[in-house]
Amino acid sequence: MKICPYCNNEFDGGRSFGGHITNCKKNPKYTEIKNKISFSRTLDRKIHKLHCIKCENEYEIEVTDNDYYKGKYKKYCNIKCANSHIRTDESKLNISNIIKEKIKKGEIIIKEKNIKIKKLKKRNFCKNCNKEILLTNKSGFCKKCLSSSKDYRKKLSDNNKGKTGGYREKGGRGKQGWFKGFYCNSSWELAYVIYCLENDIKIKRNKEGFEYIFENKKYKFYPDFIKEDGSYVEVKGYLDNKNKSKLNQFNLEIELIDKNKIQLYLCYVIEKYGENFIELYNDNMRM
């Protein structure tokens, strides 16, 4: 905070304070400052003829003698000359050599008719079949050539060892999470687990796979849970042909909890915990 010594007005910034001091009417030097400003504005102006330092065209300026001798005047005839660059012979030669090198590499081409330089877009091609591929493709091969490569298949196989097959957490599409040691892939599974735990029905997550065939291909079926008596439980709302096939080929005892049977467990959980019972998930609880 600054205070004017003449009128005691307060100012927050230095610029506003400095401007006020100059124009404060209680300042003893106020009339002297005003006279200097008015004198500088009424100085005689003269017309001078100059040559533009860019294009050397003649132009006129009207300035005071003081500004003229100090060099306070425009040195270009127009804005175009002022904004353009002054290129020396050395810089022109360097630009010419760079353009010639890019023409040899094929990075730019010159149109003969209008003599304009046009930049070519960078392109990437497959090393095997010469098909155009994306610039972000770091392998250097198209999808077809890459998948048929033995080295790629071997690398993919090595990377996936121990990572594919079997029961996987976060493998479903529903709202997932942990609840008292059980990882549930959907809200239906969560409702079933809560019902079983609170009604002394002993279950555990199944991680054993059973082979079945669908459209002449072998797959593995992993039922969701195992009961204490050794029977299996599968929570599935929608059955397509593949799901029907794996259930039909399953030789052990299994209970299918579909969209009708799940209502018993959902009603129980919603009545006790409310419709937002999925908030019971606790990812840190792995008992």
Image (cartoon, rainbow, N blue to C red):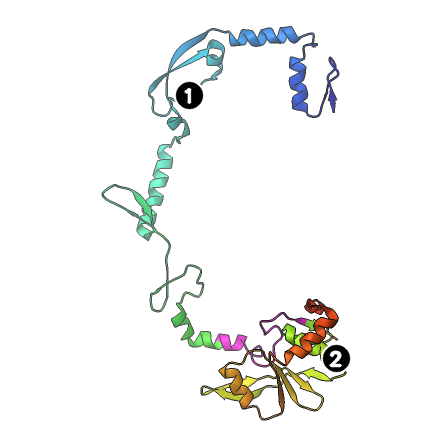
Which three-letter amino acid code belongs to the residue tagged 2? Leu
First in sequence: mark 2 vs mark 1: 1
| Residue 67 drawn in magenta | no
Residue under the image location 41 percent in, 69 percent down: 143
Residue under the image location 64 percent in, 6 percent down: 31
Q: Quadrant of the N terminus?
A: top right
Which three-letter amino acid code belongs to the residue tagged 1? Lys
Residue under the image location 34 percent in, 43 percent down: 97
Task: Give the main secondary structure, helix, strand or loop, of the magenta stretch.
Answer: loop
Circle 1 is placed at which residue position? 75
Mark drawn on residue 197: 2
The percent coordinates of residue 60 (x first, y second) are 37, 15
Residue 166 versus residue 143 in the image, above or below: below
Q: Nearer the viewer, residue 285 or 190?
A: 190
Residue under the image location 33 percent in, 52 percent down: 105
- Assign a secondary structure to mark 1: loop
